[in-house]
Image: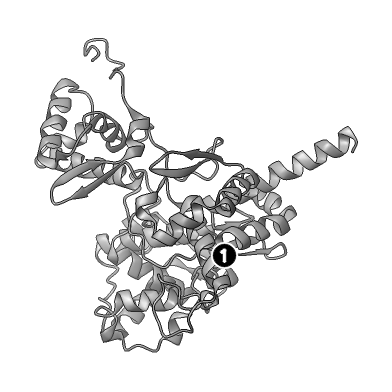
Amino acid sequence: MSNLSNQLVIAERDEVARGIRIMLVSPLLHERGAPEQFDLVRRRREPITKWFDYYCGWDLAVEPRLGYARLAKVRPTADGSRPLRRRRSGQAPFDRRRYVLLCMAAAELLSVPVTTIGLLADRVARATAADPVVADFVTAVRGERMAFVDALRVLEHLGTIEVLDGATESFVDAVEAKVLYRVDNTLLMRLLSAPTGVSQLAVPAEEVPARFDELLSAVSRERRYGAAPEQSGHLPPVSEVQRNLWLRHSIFRRLVDDPVVYLDDLTGDERAYLNSPTGRQLLRRAASEGGFLVEERAEGVMFVDPDAIATDHRFPDGAGNAKVAALLLLDRIDAVTTIEQLRVIAGELLAKFPRWAKGYRGDNGIHTLVTEALDVLRGFGLVRVADGLVHPLPAAGRYAVDATRTSDPGEGTS
């Protein structure tokens, strides 16, 4: 093979690996928002699609003419650690009201190619008034308008609506704001990613709260595995082929989605599969093809993206006080610790660095800082919290702090 051919093969392999990681961090990718990334995925869609299908059992739909790519990621259980976040500086997670307004707005947008924010708000208000379960949407209330704007900003980010004139944020200050949208109905239909459509369940609305876990399992059920252990329902017993398929997909879904996979969190069958010669071979091959490095320890395994392309959140970084506090507190969690002890430590840090974390110095500030820091640590698989106790997990050892420094020369180091 010539040197030029070798270079072309290497370039294609690198592009496929990059495309895989792009789709992991952006499962709904549209051309308007990321033209270069979409072009790469479009050109290498065949090997990227095969990678996701073989290792994770996820379908990737790439529509070059319509300008979008959609990775249908499915997990059998709800993951509350990855909420939608507001497209504002604080990036606070969505609350229940914002999720409701997001769903209502998306439903009302399906039937119109172009609309204004005022017309859409009126349609959502009428829809909520006619629904006996959903609270009325009242545009006269500023908090309601803020929640509505947060929902629309997410739809903008996903590419399902495009602002042609005006700014969505203006609706917060004035209900008469003029904002014109173009609606991508096809992309709206792609937002839902579930093997079984919700409408197929035919469950009365009043029964949904009591049966939520059951219904979530029902819409997530993938029939190709038969009655896999993690899936409920009266399906035929799994064959050996179905069983191995489920084991492979369940393991690699966690490897590409979770910061770290601990062996203790896997089932006995999953651990046996991962430690088998076939499992070890697939682990290294999947990592190589996806551009990941494999980090293995006695307690678990993780995929590391050296280019941070597939990383939606980084730790450590200085992006927020909660992450800084998480790193500082983690250095003090060398054994099982109580939450109250961490609050004492957080108070000492606030006293030592008076110019840091000013937003946490009011009433209940220390409690909030520790709560948010622990949320960060749990999200990255570094600690487990149970019954008021914080247990360090093995991956926490990667982030030991040798010194705490500040840019303020008057505050010193420790």
Amino acid tagged 1: Gly
Vertical position of residue 121 compared to residue 302: above or below: below
Q: Dot 1: what SS?
A: loop
Residue 282 visible in this rendered orientation of the protein: yes
Quadrant holding the C terminus: top left
Location of mark 1 (residue) = 57
Quadrant holding the N terminus: top right
The quadrant in which residue 297 appears is: top left
Residue nearest the observer in this picture, 350 or 54: 54
The quadrant in which residue 48 appears is: bottom right
Vertical position of residue 170 compared to residue 413: above or below: below
Q: Position of residue 411 (x, y in %)?
A: 21, 14
Task: State the colouring used for the structure image.
Answer: one colour
User: Residue lying furthest right in this view?
Assistant: 2
Residue 157 visible in this rendered orientation of the protein: no
Question: Mark 1 packing: few (<14 Cα in 10 Å), some, or many (20+)?
Answer: many
Residue nearest the observer in this picture, 64 or 288: 288
- Name which residue lies at 49% across and 38% down: 295
Residue nearest the observer in this picture, 180 or 176: 180
Query: In the displayed structure, does residue 400 sit left or right of residue 259?
Result: left
Q: Position of residue 188 (x, y in %)?
A: 53, 70
Query: In the displayed structure, does residue 135 sit left or right of residue 153?
Result: left
Q: Position of residue 317 (x, y in %)?
A: 38, 32
- Name which residue lies at 66% across and 60% down: 49
Query: In the displayed structure, does residue 134 sit left or right of residue 282?
Result: left
Q: Position of residue 133 (x, y in %)?
A: 26, 81
